[in-house]
Image (cartoon, rainbow, N blue to C red):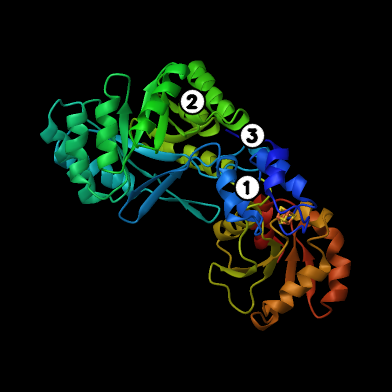
């Protein structure tokens, strides 16, 4: 049972040494009770207390990890209901469904295409996470052949979909040593599915459209020694799916209801359901098919939802070459907020004009925000110019600052007296025109 903040406090050293980042042990205990910190932040907890606190410090949603060869997909370990309260940690794994009624060749072609799909979004490579193979042919042999066909072209983790325990066991034999997810255990087959998952060290879904039944079933499966569970509230319409996924998240985070403290899986039937699953609150998402135009926005949405709101995505400060610049090409300066960097870099690249792009360390903030916060000023820009040896790369010492911080030009002239300070456009989209006409 979860301990209260006061109960936790009694098990802490009570020295108020502040090393955990909180002014007192009581403040830390309160945060621990609210699942907003981890016990490991206090280095002085005794082993005896650790054992007693384990329950309270365990994340309210169990971490489930699917593994294959060199890939891992993690879901769970979330501690908040809303992203702005802290952050979401493990983005939902996106799996592509393949059915075993296809020929071996068709399966390989489909998997290859999805497996090799990769898009670069603000410096990050986004891909799918795995495949879900569904046995609909009614033949074990087809099921096994389909799994082997996937494995011959992709090493990504698998979800095996079949309610017949014999099919599941035959499938798991083909991928021995991997941690797959079995879909799944319901009130009819849970005992056999549990035995198989225990034998092959796999996770299983728990299927029900009723949360009371699901909680009871999850507890029963646990007694069979299977701890890694994924919940499938099997209501597929938009509002029921939203309601059940939200209830599960609320019960586990707010009420610490361990029987439902697991990630969920969603099988979206359209793009809207998939968007809903990413935002609230799927741990695994199985898409019916692979289509780049549908997948790309989902991958970007997922990336945006699962970044820490307190840590903007950043690029490394430095001097970047665009379109093979030479000595006489201009230097543009911007901040290291990823979206700012890529907006500017893309516009310079698309202009076809060679340029140097100096990225100053502005703690990951965009131009105006950084300027307002005192993180992007003449001193910092001058420091970046000198620190990255920009003067050695160009013969004409011209530097273009963003139009939004034109106010810095005077101060920058004082900081860099031998440089010609130019004020560029306010918006990145106007950079190509500026490069062509103004320089
Ligand atoms: S580090 Fe531990 S002992 Fe020190 S204040 Fe935090 S909880 Fe108390």
**SS at mark 2?**
helix
- In the picture, measured across the screen, residue 37 lies left or right of residue 288, that is right
**SS at mark 1?**
loop
The numbered mark, 2 or 3, whose residue comes first in the sequence reads 3
**SS at mark 3?**
loop
Inspect this view and state whether residue 80 appears.
yes
The numbered mark, 2 or 1, whose residue comes first in the sequence reads 2
Residue, disc 1: 308
- At 82% from the left and 68% from the top, the residue drawn is 378
User: Badge 1, how many Cα within 10 Å: few under 14, some, many 20+?
Assistant: some
Q: Nearer the viewer, residue 438 or 321?
A: 321
Where does the N terminus fall, quadrant-wise?
Answer: top right
Cα distance between the residues tagged 2 and 3: 20 Å
- Residue 340: quadrant of the picture: bottom right
- In the picture, measured across the screen, residue 22 lies left or right of residue 280, that is right
What is the x, y in percent for residue 342? 59, 55
Please, is residue 237 above or below residue 152 in the view?
above
- In the picture, measured across the screen, residue 412 lies left or right of residue 161, that is right
- At 66% from the left and 83% from the top, the residue drawn is 392
Q: Nearer the viewer, residue 276 or 201?
A: 201
Please, is residue 382 above or below residue 127 in the view?
below
CB atoms of marks 2 and 3 within 8 Å: no
Q: Nearer the viewer, residue 430 or 64?
A: 64
User: Badge 2, how many Cα within 10 Å: few under 14, some, many 20+?
Assistant: few
The numbered mark, 3 or 1, whose residue comes first in the sequence reads 3
Cα distance between the residues tagged 3 and 1: 12 Å
Residue, disc 2: 272
Residue, disc 3: 82
């Amino acid at each position: 049972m979860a301990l209260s903040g006061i109960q936790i406090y009694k098990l802490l050293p009570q020295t108020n040494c502040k090393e955990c980042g909180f002014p007192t042990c009581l403040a830390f205990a309160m945060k621990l009770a609210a699942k907003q910190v981890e016990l490991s932040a206090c280095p002085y907890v005794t082993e005896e207390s650790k054992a007693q606190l384990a329950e309270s410090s365990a994340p309210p949603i169990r971490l489930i990890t699917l593994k294959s060869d060199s890939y891992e997909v993690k879901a769970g370990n979330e501690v908040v209901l809303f992203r702005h309260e802290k952050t979401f940690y493990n983005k939902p794994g996106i799996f592509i469904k393949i059915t075993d009624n296809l020929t071996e060749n068709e399966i390989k072609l489909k998997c290859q295409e999805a497996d090799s799909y990769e898009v670069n979004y603000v410096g990050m490579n986004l891909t799918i996470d795995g495949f879900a193979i569904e046995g609909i042919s009614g033949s074990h042999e087809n099921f096994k052949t389909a799994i082997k066909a996937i494995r011959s072209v992709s090493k990504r983790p698998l979800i095996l979909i079949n309610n017949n325990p014999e099919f599941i066991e035959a499938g798991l034999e083909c991928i021995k040593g991997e941690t797959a997810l079995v879909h799944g255990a319901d009130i009819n087959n849970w005992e056999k599915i549990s035995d198989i998952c225990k034998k092959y060290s796999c996770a299983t879904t728990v299927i029900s459209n009723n949360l009371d039944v699901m909680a009871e079933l999850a507890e029963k499966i646990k007694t069979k020694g299977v701890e890694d569970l994924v919940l499938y509230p099997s209501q597929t319409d938009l509002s029921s799916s939203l309601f059940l996924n939200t209830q599960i998240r609320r019960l586990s985070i707010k009420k610490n209801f361990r029987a439902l403290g697991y990630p969920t899986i969603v099988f979206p039937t359209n793009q809207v359901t998939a968007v809903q699953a990413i935002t609230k609150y799927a741990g695994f998402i199985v898409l019916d098919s692979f289509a780049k135009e549908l997948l790309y926005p989902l991958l970007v949405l997922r990336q945006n939802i699962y970044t820490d709101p307190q840590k903007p995505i950043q690029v490394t400060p430095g001097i970047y070459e665009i379109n093979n610049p030479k000595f006489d090409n201009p230097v543009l300066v911007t901040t290291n907020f990823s979206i700012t960097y890529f907006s500017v870099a893309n516009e310079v690249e698309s202009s076809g004009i060679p340029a140097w792009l100096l990225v100053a360390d502005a703690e990951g903030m965009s131009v105006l925000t950084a300027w307002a916060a005192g993180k992007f000023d003449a001193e910092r820009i001058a420091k970046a110019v000198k620190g990255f040896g920009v003067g050695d790369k160009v013969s004409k010492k011209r530097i273009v600052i963003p139009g939004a911080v034109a106010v810095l030009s005077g101060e920058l002239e004082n900081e860099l007296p031998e440089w010609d300070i130019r004020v560029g456009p306010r918006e990145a989209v106007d950079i190509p025109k500026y490069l062509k006409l103004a320089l």
